[in-house]
Image: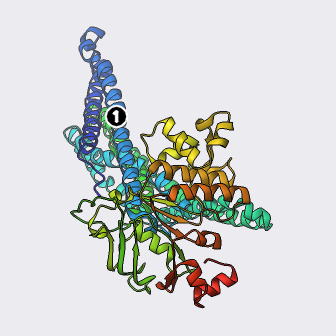
Amino acid sequence: MNLLKNRVKPTLLLAVGLGIASGFVLIAQALIVAGLVHRVMIDGSGYREVLPQLLWLPPLMLARAGLSWVSERVAFAASATIRQEVRNDLFQRLLDAGPLQLKGDRAGEVATVIVDGVEALEGYYSRYLPHLAVMAVVPLSILAAVVPADWISAGIMLFTAPFIPFFTILIGRGAERLNQRQWQTLARLGGYFLDRVNGLATLRMFNASRREAEMIARISDDYRRATMSVLYMAFLSALVLEFFATVSVALMAVVIGFRLLKGGMAFQDGFTVLLLAPEFYLPLRLMGNYYHARMEAIGAAERIFSLLDTPPAPRPAAPRPLPPISPLRICLEDVRFRYAPDSPPVIDGVTLNLAPGERVALVGPSGAGKSTLAALLLGFALPEHGRVLVNGVDLAQCDPDQWRCHVAWVPQSPHLFHGTIGDNIRLGRRDATDTDVLQAASRARCGEFIARLPHGLDTVIGEQGAGLSGGQARRIALARVFLKDSPLIITDEPTAGLDAHSETLVREALGELAQGRTVLSIAHRLATLEDADRVVVMSGGRIIEQGHYDELKGAGGLFARMAAAGEGA
């Protein structure tokens, strides 16, 4: 990924140019001040004689301050743009990867990288990179101005200057490792903390909150120690740089002082060197400080690039247009899928046909491959062998985003976002009017409780549907599906864990939703199976039985044993 986009690179170059121009103004200002002091104190010139030179100082001072301020603002604007682009790229990569690719990543760690990790790039782009060019140009320009005045001082500058970047890099090698450790600890802390916050009720129920609080305290202490190690290296580096810069300036001052006493040097030349000497070392000292911004950025970038390197879900280079969807006929032909090349297949040789308007229930023991089969139909993954055909067209040759416009997914625990109820329902169709949303809510059997809320559709709910009951959250998720109006519905037992009244409402809504649509239900309860036109039984990634509920119940196979045990999965 090229972080320096074409429209940002000129902005950074402008910041560099302004910083260099500020350095040139500084040199001119020092030369004028030295000349003024020499003429007044040594030559005894009067006010009128030095007035023309004196008038140059205010505009030069304003110009230097203005150039420095604009340079910092421009560099910060470029940094903000780059950080925004990196965050957009990260989020887009997560979207492209899909849920199957990100199953092993903890949400808290990912959030820490996107927020704090990207923010750590600010110092690198707004200070380190622009100042890198300034450090290369301004000290050399000052050196060129000092050589005609005093070649001995120029030699001292030339001899001592390399020590500053040398020790910066030497100390920075240890700082890089410490910064990476710091960011790894912060990401672990973020993931662990978010995971425990989401399971706070469970921790309280099992009296485990104190133990987990102690674990968070230990991880926090690890982060504190990692941060203090980084700060120790930063302060040590600053001390070394200040020492070399101060000793170098003091050495020049002593040499110039003795030469002035002996009359071996003009006052104006000596004063010019003394004015420029601190400014010669200033970019080098700042570079040492900003070098730690680089180390911090490198520590964060390791995890940023690991996310950016997440392979996207496979999609065709030149997708074919989808065929007419109505009526919808889906066919899986000898499909095989595995999550990793060296892992056993999760789906192995599955052949299945879904007729238009058919209700199919998918059952089987845990790990049978039901959820993976649903993911293949949702376009989150492509089979390594076989085909998924939509009205005769291989889904692997089509745009998965276009296909998902015609599929709706109703999980057991639907995700509701922080925001209004109306906005959560409008995920089904962003351009829907309030009338459309209310109609969808009514069909999902949640219009009545929404009408009782003081703000109706504008009622704000918390993350994961905080403020709603489980049944209300499921019905709002169903309202999304009604609003989307897709010909294929895939569900994962949305009635699980509901009370009798809520289950009745959800089943009524599902019954209405299924009218005229193809429905594939991952079933865990016998009541769901009785409504199906066909039951498909999976085990070990294969389909081992299929037929009507009553037929399979009397066949004496796996389904009969599961039915006798009262379980659907």
Residue 515 location (% of width, % of height): 49, 57
Residue sitting at x 35%, y 28%: 65
Question: Where on the picture, by quarter, is residue 202?
Answer: bottom right
Task: Report if residue 170 is visible in the image.
Answer: no
Task: Looking at the picture, tell me which residue is in the foreground, 65 or 195.
Answer: 195
Q: Nearer the viewer, residue 213 or 73?
A: 213
Q: How is the image coloured?
A: rainbow
Q: Secondary structure at mark 1?
A: helix
Q: Does residue 397 appear to the left or right of 128 in the view shown?
A: left
In the displayed structure, 94 sits above or below 65; it is below
The x, y position of residue 339, in whole percent, is 43, 78
Residue 184 in the figure: left or right of residue 263: right
Q: Which residue is mark 1?
A: 275
Q: Position of residue 399 (x, y in %)?
A: 30, 61
- In the rendered structure, the answer to whether residue 438 lies left or right of residue 18 reads right
Which amino acid type is marked by label 1? Leu
